[in-house]
Image (cartoon, rainbow, N blue to C red):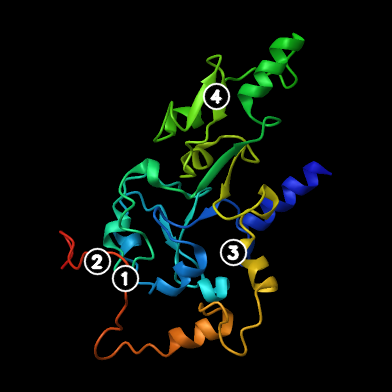
Amino acid sequence: MSGLVQWLRSALNENPFKDDFAADRMRPPGAVEEERFMELCIRCARCIEVCPYSSIQRSSYYDRLQIGTPYVYAQQRGCYLCMLCPPVCPTGALDPHVIRPLQVRMGIARINEKTCLNYIYEQDELQGVSRDGSAMICNVCFNVCPLRDTAIILKNGLLPVITDECVGCGACVEKCPTRPKSMQIITEGMVDDLRSGMYHLRSRRTSPDTSHGPADGIYHREELLQRKQELSPQGQKPTFEYDFQVQESVEGWE
């Protein structure tokens, strides 16, 4: 059954028409809480343009209300924590106070010890036999981690272990050579790995009825879409209120 589940997750993740099910999908570094993010993000693509690694992508048409908003799809390209995107966000959807990699909270990585080559190697050594005849050692996740020896360590010089300092950048997921991936990001705000990548689909099904206005002061679903559609691209740009000082100009932007 577990093999079928892994196959299904992989198939859904590779289907371009099912972004709701894309695993290892995170907001860029410094992203505020999701509902607040959806209020603030104006789809300006500054974070996408400034990223030197092409790690940030727009969500597709099939993401409905999230269309055009920035995501990091770790299985395609992880984030390498250059920290160039938070300062260029004009609305605070990416918190400009997040300037150091260890301040980032995109999620946390998890290792599938049943498919990780190093864990398989250790078991083979203990049993004195190689199950697949490869006896491979792989330290890719450790080697590519921007926070090596902090977010990830090698227990006994062999077994990768994720620490609480992991920020969920997804570099390990991108480079993991096993199929299915032995690394997964549990995105910030999700309660378990089975819901990772399905947060927005579930939230649409369970979000409160806002037909009489947003009881919590935050617009949701159709009202949020309608409010955004009312913004005109002509004339003066909409005004936003911030609880921090906005950086009006960034070197390199015309």
Res 242 label:
1
Residue named by callout 4: 138
Q: For the residues labelled 4 and 3, say whether their Cβ atoms are less than 8 Å apart.
A: no
Looking at the figure, which quarter contains the N terminus?
A: top right
Q: What element carries label 4?
A: loop
List x then y, in percent, for residue 155.
Answer: 56, 19
Task: Give the residue type at disc 2.
Answer: Val
List x then y, in percent, for residue 221.
Answer: 58, 79
Q: For the residues labelled 3 and 1, say whether their Cβ atoms are less than 8 Å apart.
A: no
Viewer-nearest of discs 2 and 4: 2
Q: What element carries label 1?
A: loop
List x then y, in percent, for residue 213.
Answer: 56, 87
Q: Is residue 167 left or right of residue 2?
A: left
Q: For the residues labelled 1 and 2, say whether their Cβ atoms are less than 8 Å apart.
A: yes
Give the residue displayed 34% in from the left and 51% down from the top.
98
Res 246 label:
2
Q: Is residue 178 left or right of residue 148?
A: right
Q: Is residue 80 visible?
A: no
Task: Give the residue type at disc 1.
Answer: Tyr
Residue named by callout 3: 19
Q: Is residue 72 visible?
A: yes
Spatial distance from mark 3 to mark 1, Cα to Cα? 31 Å
Q: For the residues labelled 2 and 3, say whether their Cβ atoms are less than 8 Å apart.
A: no
